Image (tube, grey):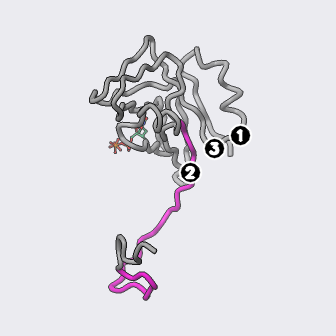
């Protein structure tokens, strides 16, 4: 699909080919900082600008900001909101809530890749109020109700 994007930070101009090439699942988001950011363990999450804005312009799509797996697993750099949901009518700059969930200090340099963006379909549902559901195999059995084997 075609997606309108604005590059708000001139330092990202040479990234345009990466944005324009489909193929990878996640588009890396860069920290558009003016100076190095140090995140200590236990610090509050910091909102980091990414220098780009998108306009999905269709409620059948949303974008998700996700951690980068390596940074999240090895260094503890994750998202203060766990997952960022970008509404289809949002036109502002994408912001990453950067949170150090680990035990070591994390250093983020300007233009470091700190998170990733994926576009996902959103099923539009009309809720249909019922007194009883059709019978299913699981029924109301919740966590662990099928055992561990
Ligand atoms: O990690 C994020 C999460 C959200 N947003 C932007 C896009 C999104 O469309 C908007 C609002 O996010 P959300 O709806 O999740 O926030 P809310 O706290 O429910 O606020 P609102 O009352 O504005 O819906 O903020 C980001 O830039 N980064």
Q: Nearer the viewer, residue 88 or 84?
A: 84
Q: Is residue 145 above or below residue 13?
A: below
Q: Residue 129: horizontal and vertical position, in percent?
A: 36, 78
Q: Nearer the viewer, residue 91 or 148?
A: 148
Look at the image and say whether residue 48 sits in the magenta stretch. Answer: no
Mark 2: secondary structure = strand
Give the mark nearer the N terminus: 2 vs 1: 1
Residues marked 2 and 1 touching at CB (< 8 Å): no
Q: Which residue is mark 2?
A: 120
Residue 37 found in image quarter: top left
Ligand 1 falls in quadrant: top left
Prevailing secondary structure class for the magenta stretch in the rendered image? loop
Look at the image and say whether residue 137 sits in the magenta stretch. Answer: yes
* Label 2, label 3: how far apart the Cα atoms are: 10 Å
Q: Residue 39: horizontal and vertical position, in percent?
A: 35, 23
Q: Residue 104: horizontal and vertical position, in percent?
A: 36, 26
Disc 2 Cβ-to-ligand 1 distance below 8 Å = no
Give the mark nearer the N terminus: 2 vs 3: 3
Mark 1: secondary structure = loop
User: Image point 48% across, 43% down: which residue?
Assistant: 89
Q: Label 2: few (<14), some or many (≥20) within 10 Å?
A: few
Q: Nearer the viewer, residue 10 or 56?
A: 10
Q: Nearer the viewer, residue 89 or 39?
A: 39
Front tag of 3 and 1: 3
Q: Which residue is mark 1?
A: 22
Disc 3 Cβ-to-ligand 1 distance below 8 Å = no
Q: Which residue is mark 3?
A: 25
User: Image point 36% across, 32% down: which residue?
Assistant: 99
Q: Which residues lie in the magenta part?
A: 116-140
User: Image point 52% across, 48% down: which residue?
Assistant: 62
């Amino acid at each position: 699909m075609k997606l309108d994007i604005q590059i708000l930070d001139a330092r990202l101009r040479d990234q345009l080919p990466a944005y324009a090439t489909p193929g990878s699942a996640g588009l890396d988001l860069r920290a558009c900082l003016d100076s190095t950011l140090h995140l200590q363990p236990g610090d509050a999450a910091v909102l980091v600008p990414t220098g780009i804005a998108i306009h999905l312009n269709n409620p059948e799509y949303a974008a998700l900001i996700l951690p980068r797996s390596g940074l999240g697993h090895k260094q503890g750099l994750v998202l203060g909101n766990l997952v960022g949901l970008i509404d289809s009518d949002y036109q502002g700059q994408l912001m990453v809530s950067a949170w150090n969930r680990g035990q070591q200090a994390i250093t983020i340099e300007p233009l470091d890749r700190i998170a990733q963006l994926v576009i996902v379909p959103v099923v539009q549902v009309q809720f249909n109020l019922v007194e009883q559901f059709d019978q299913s195999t699981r029924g109301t059995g919740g966590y662990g109700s099928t055992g561990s084997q």
